[in-house]
Image: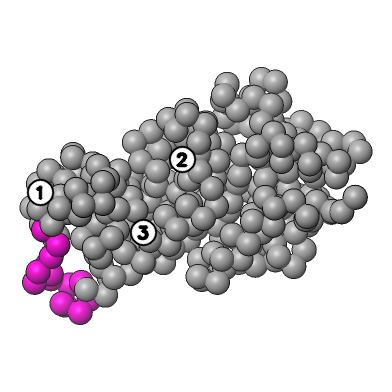
Amino acid sequence: MGTIFNEKVIEDFMHMCHDGVRQGWHERNGGNLTYRMRPEEVEYCSRFFDKKPRDWVKMPVQADNLKNEFFITTGSGKFLENVELEPQKNIAIVEINDAGDSYRIVWGLEGGGRPTSEFPTHFMNHSIRKRVTNGENRVIYHAHTPFIIALTQVLPLKAEIFTRMLWKSATECCVVFPGGVGVVPWMVPGGADIAKATCAEMEKYDAAIWAFHGLFVSGPDFDTAFGLMHTIEKAAQIATYALAANGGKKPNQVITDDNLRAIGKEFGVVLNEEVLNYKSDDDMFC
Ligand code: 2HA
Ligand code: ZN
């Protein structure tokens, strides 16, 4: 009858954790990943569910459009580095109740544990992204991306300024995130308040920076979500190097707004006009 690890979605989930570790984004227990399962994936995995599910746990958040969904999630306090070594101890499948306000573990986290400490933010982001993408988005991913974190200590914490900088770091960035990237100011992680603030950004963008902390991205599948995280973080790395190489001053030459428009036209993507037309003295990349 095989094992739960024969199911491709479980394999892909574990692989993505490892990909993030390889990038250096998951020191200790940093970062977390959740995936909203398809009915056929739940059906296959259900034969491996615990005979007796664990107790329902009430969440500080609620979502009507996630009632009775199943999620794969990393565990709170668990190291993403250990997911490939001992997945059954470091990840779980949780079921959401009829009211959309509680979860229970149906598989995994053997020996005890809870879903990621950021489950409220993941859960609410899933709700928003499911709605705004008509059910297409299934992945929410959080990583401690060092160059993004560094730049939140240097640049104004505004979505338009960060997006313009990231678009202008390298030519094809604007094709990967034409809608832009949101910014959440410093907040205490783990609770309902930061979940709500992140949701406000996820209404408009498929990625949100957490100042002094890292990045949240969403996507329809693991590759797209990982690729978005990777592209944004690499753009931040290039911007950091360019600023540092120029002594922290405004770059001597940049990809212009008209260059961005030309890329959008050629690649058939619609760049966020509000960001494209944003003008500010604080923008070093104009
Ligand atoms: O899982 O990254 O934000 C640890 C974290 C919390
Ligand atoms: Zn974190």
Is 90 left or right of 222, judged from the image as shown? right
Residue 281, percent across and down? 8, 52
Residue 187, percent across and down? 42, 46
For label 2, being within 8 Å of ligand 1 is answered: no
Query: Disc 1 versus disc 2: distance between alpha carbons?
Result: 27 Å
Task: Magenta stretch: give its range.
Answer: 243-256
Query: Disc 2 versus disc 3: distance between alpha carbons?
Result: 21 Å
Counting residues from the N terminus, which is met first, the one under dot 2 or under dot 3?
A: 2
Depth check: 99 or 272 in front? 272
Q: Secondary structure at mark 3?
A: helix
According to the image, label 3 marks what residue? 232
What's the residue type where badge 2 is placed? Ile
Neighbourhood count class around disc 1 (C-alpha, 10 Å): few under 14, some 14–19, many 20 upward:
few
According to the image, label 2 marks what residue? 194
Q: Quadrant of the C terminus?
A: bottom left
Q: Residue at x 59, y 59 (%)?
A: 16
Residue 149, percent across and down? 38, 61
Is 27 left or right of 107, judged from the image as shown? left
Counting residues from the N terminus, which is met first, the one under dot 1 or under dot 3?
A: 3
Q: Residue at x 44, y 33 (%)?
A: 133
Query: Disc 1 versus disc 3: distance between alpha carbons?
Result: 22 Å
Residues at marks 2 and 3 touching, judged by CB atoms closer than 8 Å: no
According to the image, label 1 marks what residue? 280
